[in-house]
DNA sequence: AGTCATTGCACCATCGATTGTGCAAAAAAG
DNA sequence: CTTTTTTGCACAATCGATGGTGCAATGACT
């Protein structure tokens, strides 16, 4: 019985205890015993012994032998924002419900780091990999390909592997429309009054910018180049862009589109430097949903990307095994200001342990 | 070289190619070759071959043989809030900088799940484990103990293993003081006007409640029992508590302490059901920092827990190896309203890939 | 009773690395 | 030119599990 300090029991220990051979013990404990025609009584004996001694398989040994580990990886750029952390949360739940073991790692948007991290995961013989928001999906693809590792891209598409991404164009359209319509409640809107901050030269940003510009052209008749302010994915850079705009114009744009919640943090940094009241009348659209962001003191329209659907679709693709390098679009959702959506945490039971 | 589709190279492949024995190859590739008196020229030859063929060690095999894996685990209750996701972010960075491989998993505050997840980690021979916010730290401790796994508790203390936690009492004191002082700007404050929402019967909640009550007693002369509204860690329950209060009193308390950012999301859900203007004058203290939470349309004082210091201290404790089951306190920090702190993401470089 | 099929399990090679041990060849010492 | 020491490496056992193969015992059937 679970003696403290002792080494963990192995199939050899149980083999001695039960009088069966190690292979029999192994078969019983990994469930393949019916296939191997082990007597029910023998199986039960071994099972009981295993329970008594708190046996758990050494998964490294199993993985080494079978060259499968039961691990499913999720490669994230960063943890520290609601979009990716809630993706991690759903990923864990979905993978665990399939009896596999989720492993989440982040690579800080560094292409080299991305490849290295994936190499490491491969060294642990992970079975499948979700590549979310990779800066260089095709680079990662090459590494996976070489090792024969099944993988899908999430959020940012690659050209060599199947991808599941948000419909960024459509999301940007909805978002841009929403802020322009909202702005029109206070009178006519000129194209020069609507800006976009954030983003860089990745697929998601390009699509969002395209959607933004398309709507501006159709609703406002023009979309001046100057209204696009790419700042990369960095709060500090974004704050600087707002500051620069403010220095030049004495105010922020009447309404603007922020490329991600990370960039929206840049807006906060800017706001912190300036008096509260000055900006009560701005209208913001943010491509990403954050519950607290939704309740800022000015209207914030947000886009909630359906990471659950993306992960689920990714799992389905991996399961299907036929993997044309197609790109699947998942529809995001427009969230009006002051909206508190429920998230993955709401499915948790919250026991009080008295 | 790196031929696509081929199986990964092993030390045996390199042994044939180089004309050396597998053990020599192994020694060269894992760095122990000087100790084993391998000629520099031999080492270089093998190294070059390894590079050419893109050799990477099979870490499961290594782990099996040496019963150490290079993995360091972090067990989290949930990912989906800024406190824990930023903890994960720092954890990754710190562990990686020590040449080990971080593995983050969540257990949804379910004691049984916690133990199971840890069992799984143990089956992969992880070397060390950080147990953050565990509902049942001592239960997890027992599992670790049995397997001889070094571990520390973070955020919620256990009695059997060393723990590193926030000074919740002091944090709660600061926070309560801050909201009372802020409230006093609008006139005298009665004890019945200051509430606490959220928390359950865990060490952190108890300490925070203790700090809250101590300050109320010393600043306001009393702290009525009715002002403590424990709701567990669930947005939905918290929202219900606010709603109940509102139904009973026709308004929210003048100022209140919210036990965590998760509970603060409950406040959002309540707010979403009610007109904006009604609550412009509330004053909130939230035990946890969230950048967007800090800019809500009413004053929100927040407590930023120093998860970086906690992780660092935890690493130091594990490194020291002498592990009395002492509890180390880390000072948290009071964050005034409308403050955008920088986080772990700010250390990232943000390259634009043109 | 003899043949054949089925049941129930043991044996053993294998996955890819690590590490203690031993032994030639080369170098140093005498 | 021996003897001793050092250098450089090969050998083989081992970590814990898996799965193909083979063989004895049992039961079914003619």
Image: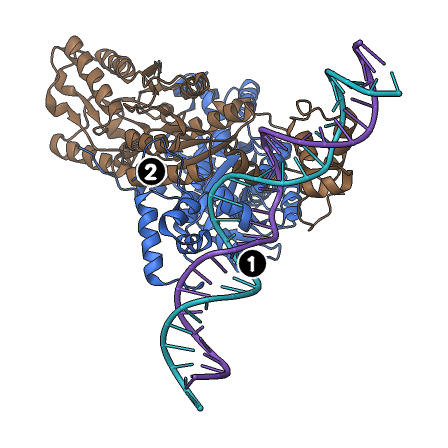
Chain colours: A blue, B brown, C purple, D cyan
Residue A193's disc number: none
Residue with the mark numbered 1: A321
Q: Position of residue C1 (x, y in %)?
A: 43, 84
**Residue at mark 2 to residue at mark 1: CA–CA distance:** 33 Å
**Residue B57 figure quarter:** top right
Q: Quadrant of the N terminus of chain B?
A: top right
- Quarter of the image holding residue B105? top left
Q: In the image, is B161 to the left or to the right of B349?
A: left
Let me know if marks 2 and 1 both belong to one chain. Answer: no
Q: Quadrant of the C terminus of chain B?
A: top right
Question: Residue A13, located in which quarter of the rendered image?
Answer: top left
Circle 1: element type: loop
> What percent of the width, then of the height, locates residue B252?
19, 28
Foreground of the two, A282 or B82:
B82
* Dot 1: chain letter: A
Callout 2: SS: helix
Which residue corresponds to the image point at 47% horizontal and 22% vertical from the top-left?
B343
x and y percent of residue A296 in the render?
38, 29
Q: Is residue A340 visible?
A: no
The answer to whether the residue labelled 2 contacts the one labelled 1, judged by CB atoms less than 8 Å apart, is: no
Residue D4's place in the image compared with A55, above or below, is above
The residue where tag 2 is placed is B115
């Amino acid at each position: 019985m679970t003696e403290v300090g002792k080494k963990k029991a192995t199939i050899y220990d149980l083999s001695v205890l039960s009088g069966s051979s190690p292979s029999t013990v192994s078969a019983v404990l990994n469930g393949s015993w019916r296939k191997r025609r082990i007597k029910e009584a023998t199986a039960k004996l071994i099972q009981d012994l295993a329970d008594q001694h708190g046996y758990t398989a050494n998964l490294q040994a199993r993985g080494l032998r079978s060259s499968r580990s039961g691990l499913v990886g999720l490669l994230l750029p960063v943890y520290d924002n609601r979009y990716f952390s809630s993706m991690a949360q759903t990923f864990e739940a979905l993978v665990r419900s399939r009896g596999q073991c989720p492993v989440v790692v982040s690579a800080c948007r560094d292409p080299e780091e991305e490849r290295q991290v994936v190499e490491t995961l491969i060294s642990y013989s992970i079975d499948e990999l979700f590549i979310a928001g990779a800066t260089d999906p095709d680079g990662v693809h090459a590494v996976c390909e070489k090792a024969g590792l099944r993988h899908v891209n999430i959020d940012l598409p690659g050209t060599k592997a199947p991808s599941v991404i948000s419909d960024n164009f459509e999301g940007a359209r909805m978002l841009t429309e929403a802020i322009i319509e909202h702005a029109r409640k206070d009178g006519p809107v000129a194209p020069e009054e609507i800006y976009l901050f954030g983003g860089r030269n990745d697929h998601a940003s390009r699509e969002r910018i395209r959607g933004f510009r398309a709507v501006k052209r159709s609703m406002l008749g023009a979309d001046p180049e100057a209204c696009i302010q790419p700042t990369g994915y960095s709060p500090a850079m974004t704050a600087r862009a707002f500051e620069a705009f403010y220095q030049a114009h004495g105010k922020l744009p009447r309404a603007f589109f922020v490329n991600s919640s990370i960039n929206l943090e840049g807006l906060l940094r800017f706001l912190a430097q300036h008096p509260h009241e000055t900006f009560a009348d701005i209208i913001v659209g943010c491509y990403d949903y954050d519950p607290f962001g939704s309740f800022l003191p000015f209207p914030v329209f947000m886009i909630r990307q359906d990471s659950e659907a993306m992960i689920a679709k990714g799992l389905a693709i991996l399961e299907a095994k036929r993997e044309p390098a197609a790109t699947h679009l998942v529809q995001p959702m427009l969230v009006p200001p002051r909206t508190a959506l429920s998230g993955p945490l709401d499915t948790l039971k919250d026991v009080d342990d008295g």
